[in-house]
Image (cartoon, rainbow, N blue to C red):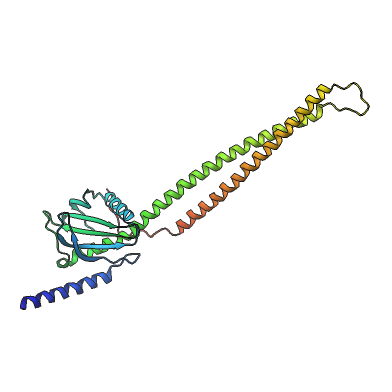
Amino acid sequence: MKKMMILCATLMTMGTAMAQTNSIYTSDSGAVPEIKSVLNNDKNLILGYTITFEYPVEDIEEAVIARLETEGVEGSKKKNFYAFKEIKYNYLWNRTFDMYMQFIGSKNAGTINLLLSQGYDNFIIPTEDSLTTDKVYKWLTALDLDVQNYRYDVTMQAHQEELENIDKELAKLEKERDKVEKKIKKNNDAQLKFEASRTIVSGNELNVDTKAIEKEQKQGKKLLDERAKLESDLYKVTEKIANVRSDLNKKNYAIDNLQSQKPKSNQIVRKKK
């Protein structure tokens, strides 16, 4: 009975400590870190840390692993856990330790499960190390901005690539338009030359070379048909240019709008490699 009372008191103390810590650390988007039991690689329940963000789990994983690699923390993935062996990472712990990280979720939300060990699967108990727990909570909540910035960079890169393709398409169409306009000018010059040299037959002229007249008529019709086709080509390419310029304006607007929503910088200062 006495042992049961002690256990209940301990659980109540743990719950109070966890509630207080959670109330202190809340991420930029409102995610709250927690302590809960996590299945490790050996399918044993270990008390660890967790936080859930409402972003695609793939983005969360990419952002967090990219951050760790930038900070010189590299590990290996086994099954569904990343293992970081004998690392020194003062954001979490001021000693050499092992870290195990798991990312689970969907396209709508992703959860990070985190376990810390002093080696040989000697996992720390979060409820018994408030100093480390505070540091872990601070780090986990700060990951929110890492994910936001990752998603921002990916989206911006996609916009920039699309913008580059639109610019290329516009340059190609403008070059095509210039060629058509040159052909139209050449056609105009040919028509002026034709009009200046063609045979003019008066009503009472008897000695008329009908074959020459027919040839000139064919030549004149050919120039007019060519002009009609060129004007049609010019209209089509000009219409395409207008559409592409509209796409260009929309893409620039999207980029400007995205830039105005650029996430804040992470307050945690990153170490150089």
State the image quarter where residue 121 is shown. bottom left
Residue 185 lies left or right of residue 117; in this view the side is right
Note whether residue 145 is visible: yes
In the rendered image, the quadrant that contains the N terminus is bottom left
Q: Quadrant of residue 10?
A: bottom left
In this picture, residue 60 sits left or right of residue 122? right
Q: Position of residue 257 (x, y in %)?
A: 48, 57
Seen from this angle, which residue lies furthest left?
A: 2
Q: Is residue 171 above or below residue 84?
A: above
Q: Residue 263, image x and y in percent? A: 39, 59
Count of numbered tags: 0
Q: In this view of the protein, can residue 93 be seen by the observer?
A: no
Q: Residue at x 36, y 54 (%)?
A: 150
Examine the rendered structure and indicate whether residue 5 appears above or below residue 163. Answer: below
Q: In x, y percent, where is residue 59?
A: 33, 54
The residue depicted at 55 percent of the width and 43 percent of the height is: 170
- Measured as percent of width and height from the top left, residue 147 is found at 34, 57
- The residue shown at (33%, 67%) is 30
Q: Which residue is pictured at 20% across the width and 51% down the height? A: 84
Q: Is residue 36 above or below residue 180?
A: below
